[in-house]
Amino acid sequence: MRTVINQAHAELELIKTQKDFSEFLSKYEDVFSFSDSTLTPKIQIEALKSIVNRNGLYEINGHLVKVTENKILSASKDKYESLVSVKNSDPSELSRLGIQVHDMDIQDINLLSDGRTNEACATTMENSYYYNPSGCKDDRKAYFRARSYRQATPGSGGTYYDYRVEILVWGTRRSGTFCNWSGYNTQLEYRNIAFSIWAYQRLSLTTSASTSEPRFFPIPLNDESLNDAGSLVTDFSVGDWLFNEPQPNNPFTSFYGEAKSQGIGNNWIVITCP
């Protein structure tokens, strides 16, 4: 999927007519949503974009997995056509087709109101900074997101649940005839990130299921930076994986971090809670 996304960003900059733009949106309607002049990939988790194909599919442990905006669908390999064509996310209908539905337990994004804001903690917190020198071309935005989510992986005898945190920084710029926003490669960095969150400690494991209890995790991160990158992402497990035991995903209990892109100069985006 990452190759398709990069190809689309390159094509967008070359579009000259409204007809071409409409055809572009139709060509990539399965990959992007388009709102407020901004092209946004439908798959939200950055690490998953790198392993799925254009249909949102990948194979693991003898099963096929389809990633959507906030769900993971899994089935045996003979259900390939059903997974590719599925539109309805109703669990009972998908179960009839032999497809399991796993919710990533991602809440709506808590969009912060400016570059330095203290808000209530959530499972997904996002902030941005807008550099606007021209009102059109050469404008830049940088985004900073912290997210917790639950990843489901099918395996022998059931489903493994992994509780994860994603730290993501990316930039967009206005370009092309219509000055739409899309991703581009730039220098990205984050610093001073420390957070806490509840996850799970596995107490026992049998062939049918695990048992667990909640555990509190305070986590500092090392500063990171990348040059000429479309995104800077750190994605890792917190606590233990669980088997056939889908515990809820938890919001952060505290978070502080700073991030920026080269395109917004020396302005740092801050996420802090509570």
Image: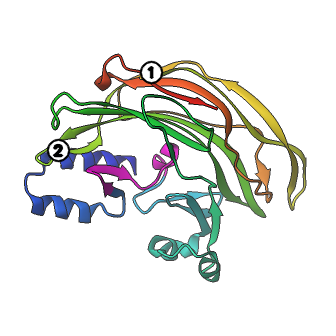
Q: Residues within 10 Å of mark 2 (few under 14, many from 20)?
A: some
Type of amino acid under label 1: Ser
Is residue 188 among the parts visible in the rendering?
no
- Closer to the camera in the image, 151 or 213: 213
Q: Quadrant of residue 85?
A: bottom left
Residue 221 pos. (x, y %)? 61, 22
Compared across the picture, whether 91 is left or right of 188 comes to right
| Vertical arrangement, residue 274 with respect to residue 9, above or below | above
Compared across the picture, whether 76 is left or right of 181 comes to right
Residue at image point 59% right, 65% down: 73
Disc 2 target residue: 179
- Closer to the camera in the image, 252 or 30: 252
Q: Quadrant of residue 153?
A: bottom right
Q: Earlier in the sequence, mark 2 or mark 1?
A: 2
| Vertical arrangement, residue 110 with respect to residue 219, above or below | below
Residue 57 pos. (x, y %)? 49, 60
Residue 195 pos. (x, y %)? 66, 28
Residue at image point 49% right, 35% down: 168
Residue 19 pos. (x, y %)? 11, 63
| Vertical arrangement, residue 201 with respect to residue 221, above or below | below
As measured in the structure, the alpha-carbon distance from the residue carrying label 2 to the one carrying label 1 is: 28 Å
The residue stretch that appears in magenta: 34-51
Disc 1 target residue: 225
